[in-house]
Structure formats: C-alpha cells, structure tokens
Image (tube, rainbow, N blue to C red):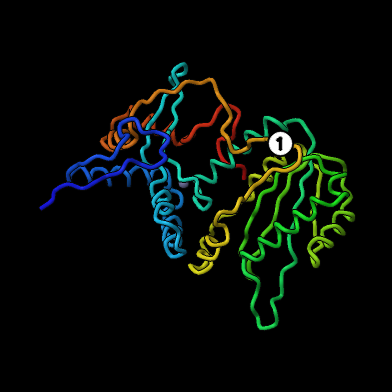
Amino acid sequence: MDTTCRVESVPGSLVQPLETSPHLIDYVGCSQRFDQLRLESSFRHSGWTHLRERVKTGLMQAGEPPNVVERFCKCGSNAWIMQSRDNPERFKLSAFHCKHRLCLQCQHELRRIVAANLLARLDGRKVRFLTLTLRHAAGDGDGEQPSLHDNINRLYDSFTKLRRTSSWKHHVVGGVSFLEVKRTSQGWHPHLHILFDGKYFPQRELSNLWLRCTGDSYIVDIRDIPGSDGIRYITKYCTKVSTFMSDEELVQMIHSLRSRRTFTTFGTWSHWKLSTPPKTEEVWIYLYPLHDVLRAADRGETWAAEILTQLNHRPYLLPEGDFDKPPE
Ligand SMILES: [Zn+2]
C-alpha cells in the first residue's frame, strides 16, 4: 500500500519559510498538516465559521474553478507570529490571505488598508459623499425581476455616463466609489457609495443628471463631510453575504461579482494605490508558527497565552495610524 501523499506548498503564500516546493510526507505528516490548517483557519475565521462554510459550498455550486475554492479554504494558513525587531512588545500575524471578495476577513483587511491610505491623504480636508442607487425595478409584467448581474451592469453603466457629462466634470475632480449589494424583501439593491473632491454640487442638478443617465432613477444623496468621516462611511459599506440569504441567492451573488471590481478610483484619484498596504520602516522577524503557540496555550503555558491575547487585539497588524477594527 502506498503510505505517502503529496502536499503542495500553499500557492501564492506570503510566508513560506519552511516549504518552497512540493514534497512527500507520510500519512501521519498529512494528518498533522490538516490539523494545523484547521487550527490556523479557525483562528482567523472564528467569527463567521458557519457562514464561511456556506460561502465555500456556494463557490462550488456556482462552478468556481477548484483553485479559487482552494485559495478560499486555505485563507489563514501558513500562519506565523512575527515580532517587531525594534519594539519586541509588538507582534503580528502573517498568513496566506485568499483576498476573495466574499471572504469576510480579507474584506475587513482590504477596508482597513483603504481607510489607512485615504486617511493619509484626506485627513483634515472636506470631501463630498454621494450615494447613487437605482429605482427598484417592478419586473417585466410576469413577476420576473432583473437579475443582480443586470442590475449591477446598469448601475455601473449609468455611473460611467454620469462621469462623462460636462456638469460632472465641472464639479468633480477625483474620487473613489464602492459597490454595496444588499438583498431586501423586495429584491436586490445595489448602491454606489462615492467619496469625491470637488466643487459644491447642487442636489437638484445631480438628481436631474442621474435621471438622464438611468432613465428612471432620480434619488441621490449628497453631503459635505470631513475627510475622516467620509473614510468611515465609505469603508463601512461593503458587499457581504448575510445569514438570511438563500443558497440560490448566494450563488447568484457569486456569479454577479465574478471578475468585477467592487471599488474603483477615478479622475485625479486614479493613480492612488488605495489597496496597497502603506509602507512602514518597521522590521519584522519570524518568531513561532501559530499552531505551536496555540497548542502551547492549550497546555496552559502563559507565554503563549500572552502572545495570543496581544494578537486578539490586533491580529493582522497594519502600520501605525490605521484602524484596529473596521469602522462601524
Ligand atoms: Zn480570505
């Protein structure tokens, strides 16, 4: 009987200190590896275990390629605790991140990075916050409502038309837009939340423009706010799976968001790399594999419990000045 199995190194992992190529290990090694993956994964995803399982099933049902599902499942694996070289009281966790748009943890991190980058550029400045939405479609007579995919396409096309108008170009210099998809009892409800820099844009003028671009929707919400509030607003709204969504709706959402950007910059903000983590001078060194520390804490070793307590406050540390938690 063949007593070996092949374990691939985690594709695209940020940290592969011990494994850089596929290798053979025995069954005992395999089972240890799976235990390790389960430990690491539950540490990162403890807040949404059940929902995450549903998303995983949804990805398979939606026919996502196996490598996409595999990346999603391995999110949080290969986790190492790192220590700041110059500030040994500071720890952070480094792990493989799937970056899938329906992975709650990866989306939280993305929003924190975007918020930190926006804060560095907009703090102390006044910006404008705009929400665009489409009138709820009544259906085509036989009760059939437009699909989420069609709704998002129409929202994006209308926003492109709006940005091409001379009035928009006159009032708006640059900005960023985020897509939020909501499921209500009346159906899908996609919104665009936009933060922009520019001149005062009269609400009535904007409403008329939006009606011209969409053909049926005129409701726009626009307000002047301090930059820091704008960052809080814009990073608060994101597309996420909710527990009351049916399996069918979840699959629909996965199809509709496939290969689609959920946030984008425009105008003078186009070159802003908002999703790139801000640079830091801090040097980090690999300390322990997370699973070793989790097991030591389980055995009651206080040093391990102390490190984990610190990590629970700031598990995936960003440079100074960022948010500890996604804004509520
Ligand atoms: Zn993830």
Please tell me how many numbered marks the rendered image carries.
Answer: 1
**Ligand 1 within 8 angstroms of badge 1 C-beta:** no
- Residue 274 is situated, as x and y percent measured from the top left of the image, at 63, 37
Q: Label 1 sits on what residue type?
A: Ser
Tell me which residue sits at (74%, 63%) in the image: 134
- Residue 227 is situated, as x and y percent measured from the top left of the image, at 74, 36
Tell me which residue sits at (87%, 41%) in the image: 199
Residue 230 relative to residue 50: left or right: right
In the picture as drawn, the residue positioned furthest to the top comes out as: 86
Judging depth in this view, the residue of 292 and 172 nearest the camera is 172
Q: Residues within 10 Å of mark 1 (few under 14, many from 20)?
A: some
Q: Is residue 182 above or below residue 112?
A: below
In the picture as drawn, the residue positioned furthest to the left comes out as: 1
Tell me which residue sits at (57%, 26%) in the image: 279
Judging depth in this view, the residue of 66 and 240 nearest the camera is 66
Residue 91 picture quarter = top left
Residue 21 picture quarter = top left
Q: Is residue 221 above or below residue 275?
A: below
Residue 33 relative to residue 238: left or right: left
- Residue 261 is situated, as x and y percent measured from the top left of the image, at 61, 50
Residue 155 relative to residue 215: left or right: left
Q: In the structure shown, which secondary structural element does the residue marked by tag 1 occupy? A: helix
Q: Tell me the quadrant of the picture where the C terminus can be found.
A: top right
- Residue 311 is situated, as x and y percent measured from the top left of the image, at 44, 33
Residue 173 relative to residue 10: left or right: right
Residue at mark 1: 228
